[in-house]
């Protein structure tokens, strides 16, 4: 007997989830379902991604709602389109054997007319992203007066994305006597505030330690120089031939560049970020789920709703700005009780952040060495041998060709045939990795483990001699993040993000490194450039110019051209063509 029956779930639902492979409740399901089935409590559930939260609230909803009625009785709010679609599809699968269940997914980037048509036909469960839900409410196209249950899924991420006001406006259209169920991976103060504002004496359930990471995930980190990061990343991928991973980047620009570079280098990879249309996103995700892609390169927001089984590795090409996001990233692997590895590529100055993350997730990181070339070649060779051992042989189809094959190999010994066959793959990697340098950094002094040429690579001031350190009079007070300033510099100068080294973002100015070959292009690109009515200035910081003056400026409040203090806007992303903001991306 399926143990879900013992939780109070009826047979027709249990039969449906048994067909989906639900044989045993996860801890969050086992503890949350009996509480939610009473329908009498507000609820706060803290559990990591990949622990089965959708079934934890979806199954009780199917038990509690009256499907003979065609008006909205439950509203599920979530941060991204991908997650919205995933939840709606999962609930529909759970309800396979229940008649008259209507679920509608409401999200941006798809036809609002189709969504409105589904709502008009009658719906009991609405799964929505806040932005599109507000659009539909604004059209007076939905009536939430009979909603009994509101679920806030991935509440911490909705707040990180700036949906607080949207959530307030949406909930104001629902009855006060409804029950609110909140699910979150972490419990920052903002989520605690939601619980206080919208709930009455909620039942709180924590599965695992608050803000902790999945116990089935190993956390590895590699210390490399910024300029060697892509090469180290490829070497790590090549040393894991069966990798099926998600690679996280901080910016859309970086995401696109890495994906394009990987494709050029022959990898099965593609990118997922906010500038893609819904059709493009669906196409990428279809290829990834079908494993036509081996590597998915994504931003934090784009990847938040991804629910793909058997992801072996999460790779942090860049560490997230917010430590909590590391938990969400790593949670893409080791789902449903499986194991996985989370890898971070860091430079020396980011080691402190690794220690901070260790405290948050309650698990130590393991320092790993970037594999040497010969190690990668060996791994690839034996991966090929393993494929040969595992390959299925279709005797009926191959037998007619065997006489000719045997005739072709007649002059070769068994050992020679094996050597030549193995060399087909071996030679390719041997050629690429022959004489490959050691990319590891010695944490004691910051230089590569290969000491040869150390003096040539670093100048006397400690900066790499093939980079120039520049100053720009824009900083965090202008609402720039490091990703924003990277995009702004690259777009204004028309150079690749690969040419930019370390970025040191300050209050009213920023220091950044540029490969020497591109310095003149940066200066030329910033001639006569204004930002919000203020002249943008680029200076060479390596000789100390601009540094002292800017430190003094950093202590002063920044004012715009009319002398008024600028109000900071924390939403949206930059359109660097003119310093203006485009409409806030919900993805």
Image (cartoon, grey):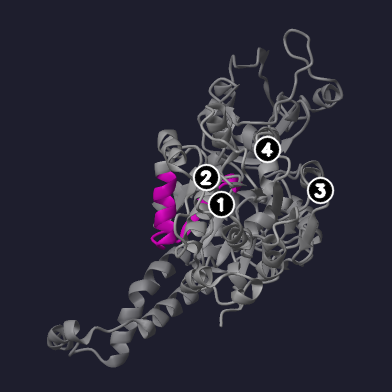
> Which is nearer the eye, 448 or 253?
253
Inter-mark Cα distance, 1 to 2: 7 Å
Mark 1 burial class by Cα count in 10 Å: few <14, some 14-19, many 20+: many
Can residue 346 be seen at all in this image of the molecule? no
The percent position of residue 410, horizontal first and vertical second, equals 17, 90
Can residue 345 be seen at all in this image of the molecule? yes
Q: Quadrant of residue 411?
A: bottom left
Q: Which mark is residue 200?
A: 3
Which residue occupies 44% across, 58% down?
288
| The residue stretch that appears in magenta | 280-301
- Indicate whether residue 283 is drawn in magenta: yes
Q: Which mark is residue 81?
A: 2
Q: Provide the residue designation for mark 4.
A: 171
Which sits earlier in the primary sequence, circle 1 or circle 4? 4
Left or right: residue 235 compared with residue 345: left
Which residue occupies 74% across, 30% down?
476
Q: Provide the residue designation for mark 1.
A: 305
Inter-mark Cα distance, 2 to 4: 19 Å
């Amino acid at each position: 007997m399926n143990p879900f029956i013992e939780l109070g779930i009826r047979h027709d639902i249990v039969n449906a989830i048994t067909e989906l492979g639900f044989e045993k409740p996860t801890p969050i399901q086992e503890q949350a379902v009996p509480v939610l089935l009473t329908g009498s409590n507000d609820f706060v559930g803290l559990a990591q991604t990949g622990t089965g939260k959708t079934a934890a609230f979806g199954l009780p909803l199917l038990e509690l709602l009256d499907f003979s009625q065609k008006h909205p009785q439950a509203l599920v709010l979530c941060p991204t389109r991908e997650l919205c679609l995933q939840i709606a599809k999962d609930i529909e699968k759970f309800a396979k054997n229940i008649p008259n269940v209507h679920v509608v997914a409401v999200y941006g980037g798809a036809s609002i007319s189709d969504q409105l048509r589904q709502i008009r036909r009658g719906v009991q469960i609405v799964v929505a992203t806040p932005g599109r839900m507000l659009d539909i409410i604004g059209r007076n196209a939905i009536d939430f007066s009979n909603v009994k249950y509101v679920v806030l899924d991935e509440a911490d991420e909705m707040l990180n994305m700036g949906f607080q006001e949207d959530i307030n406006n949406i909930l104001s259209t629902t009855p006060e006597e409804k029950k609110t169920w909140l699910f979150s991976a972490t419990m920052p103060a903002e989520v605690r505030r939601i619980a206080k504002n919208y709930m009455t004496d909620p039942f709180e359930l924590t599965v695992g330690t608050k803000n902790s990471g999945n116990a089935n995930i190993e956390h590895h980190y590699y210390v490399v120089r910024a300029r060697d990061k892509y090469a180290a990343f490829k070497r790590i991928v090549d040393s894991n031939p069966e990798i099926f991973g998600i690679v996280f980047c901080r910016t859309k620009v970086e995401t696109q560049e890495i994906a394009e570079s990987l494709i050029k280098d022959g990898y099965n990879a593609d990118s997922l970020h906010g500038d893609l249309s819904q059709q493009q996103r669906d196409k990428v995700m279809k290829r990834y789920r079908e494993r036509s892609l081996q590597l998915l390169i994504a931003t934090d927001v784009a990847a938040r709703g991804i629910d793909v089984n058997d992801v072996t590795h999460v790779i942090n090409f860049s560490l997230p700005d917010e430590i909590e996001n590391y938990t969400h990233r790593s949670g893409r692997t080791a789902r449903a009780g499986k194991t996985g590895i989370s890898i971070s590529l860091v430079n020396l100055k980011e080691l402190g952040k690794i220690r901070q993350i260790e405290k948050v997730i309650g698990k130590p990181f393991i320092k790993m060495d970037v594999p040497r070339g010969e190690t990668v070649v060996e791994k690839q060779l034996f991966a090929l041998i393993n494929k040969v051992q595992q390959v299925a042989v279709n005797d009926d189809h191959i037998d007619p060709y065997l006489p000719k094959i045997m005739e072709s190999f007649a002059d070769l010994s068994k050992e020679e045939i094996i050597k030549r066959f193995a060399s087909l793959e071996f030679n390719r990697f041997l050629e690429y990795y022959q004489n490959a340098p050691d990319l590891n950094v010695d944490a004691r002094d910051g230089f590569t483990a290969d000491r040869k040429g150390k003096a040539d690579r670093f100048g006397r001031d400690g900066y790499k001699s093939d980079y120039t350190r520049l100053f720009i009079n824009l900083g965090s007070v202008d609402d720039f993040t490091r990703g924003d300033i990277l995009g702004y510099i690259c777009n204004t100068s028309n150079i690749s993000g690969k040419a930019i080294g370390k970025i040191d973002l300050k209050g009213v100015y920023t220091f950044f490194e540029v490969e020497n070959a591109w310095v003149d292009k940066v200066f030329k690109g910033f001639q006569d450039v204004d930002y919000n009515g203020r002249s943008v200035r680029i200076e060479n910081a390596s000789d100390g110019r601009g540094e002292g003056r800017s430190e003094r400026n950093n202590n002063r409040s920044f004012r715009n051209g009319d002398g008024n203090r600028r109000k900071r806007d924390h939403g949206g992303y930059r359109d660097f063509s003119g310093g203006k903001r485009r409409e806030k991306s919900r993805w």
